[in-house]
Image (spheres, helix red, strand yellow):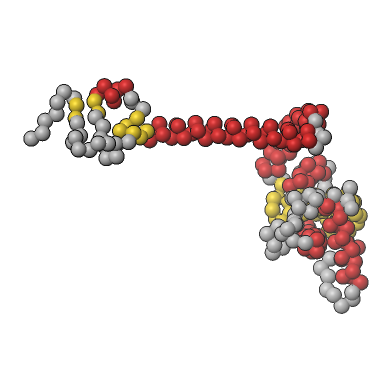
Amino acid sequence: MATLSNRRRTLPQDDTDAQVITADSVSTNYRTMPCLVTGKTVLQPHLARQESLRRNIGHVAAETYLITRLAITLLRYLGIGYRWITQLLALGCYALLLMPGFLQVAYYYFSSPKVKRSLVYGDQPRNRFDLYLPSDIGKPNPVLIFVTGGAWIIGYKAWGSLLGLQLAERGIIVACLDYRNFPQGTISDMINDTCQGISFIINNIAKYGGDPNRVYLMGQSAGAHISSCALLEQAARESNKGENVSWSISQIKAYFGLSGG
């Protein structure tokens, strides 16, 4: 029967890659663990993860420094020197100063029971609208349909939350329409979505305390372009006597186009 000498075990001599393990070597080299099969030294699992994390952090820091240095060099070649960079940083600081106000509006948007989010008006995934209700809905209130902007690519109904908050406090129901953006749809698709949303709101706003006889339309930036085109599209449909329409331009009391095309 094989015996173990003083805390030492030796592998067979014919294995040239084998290593000898002693209690002293384990205590002094506690970070590594020799593999008795291959004879190679491997890290313990949790220490290996720490080493991997350190390497990843170092790699990310090096890449970030390289990209920042190249970006600054590129800006200098383009004629955008440190003055422009400092102005950009100043703009970022200004945005941080505005952040508390935006957070307040965001909290109201997600927590207020007076905000009905993502009501459906059509079959498309973006056929949704938000409804901002005033505190007093005991009597029919005027209604504003707001089509938000976004350069035809980033339009979103939540961009009208500040307007909805301000007007709802003054007894006006605000409906912020969402519509398909490019490349989900073309300009014609955006106009059709807007027409469908206007039709749904006019025909159903009485259920939410709105006055269907006092409906106003507003668009901002790309939303002003889309909403004005929607009015023209609806006028063309109404001029065609044989076409069935679900709403009429005469039901819109006024139109406001802000910074539109």
Task: Name the image quarter holding residue 232.
Answer: bottom right
Task: Name the image quarter holding residue 39.
Answer: top left
Residue appearing at x 82%, y 47% in the figure: 172
Task: Name the image quarter holding residue 12.
Answer: top left
- Comparing 239 with 84, the one in front is 84
- Comparing 130 with 76, the one in front is 76
Image location (x, y in percent) of residue 88: 78, 32
In the figure, is residue 121 to the left or right of 226? Answer: left
Quarter placement of the N terminus? top left
Instruction: Say whether residue 87 is visible.
Output: no
Relative to 5, residue 179 above or below? below
- Comparing 68 with 193, the one in front is 68
In the figure, is residue 82 to the left or right of 62? Answer: right
Looking at the image, the residue that sits furthest to the bottom is 242
Instruction: Say whether residue 12 is visible.
Output: yes
Image location (x, y in percent) of residue 133: 76, 48
Relative to 54, residue 221 above or below? below
Image location (x, y in percent) of residue 261: 89, 53
Residue appearing at x 19%, y 30% in the figure: 9
Image location (x, y in percent) of residue 83: 81, 28
- Comparing 50 with 65, the one in front is 65
Residue appearing at x 19%, y 26% in the figure: 8
Residue appearing at x 89%, y 76% in the figure: 241
Q: Across the whole image, how many numbered discs are drawn on residues? A: 0
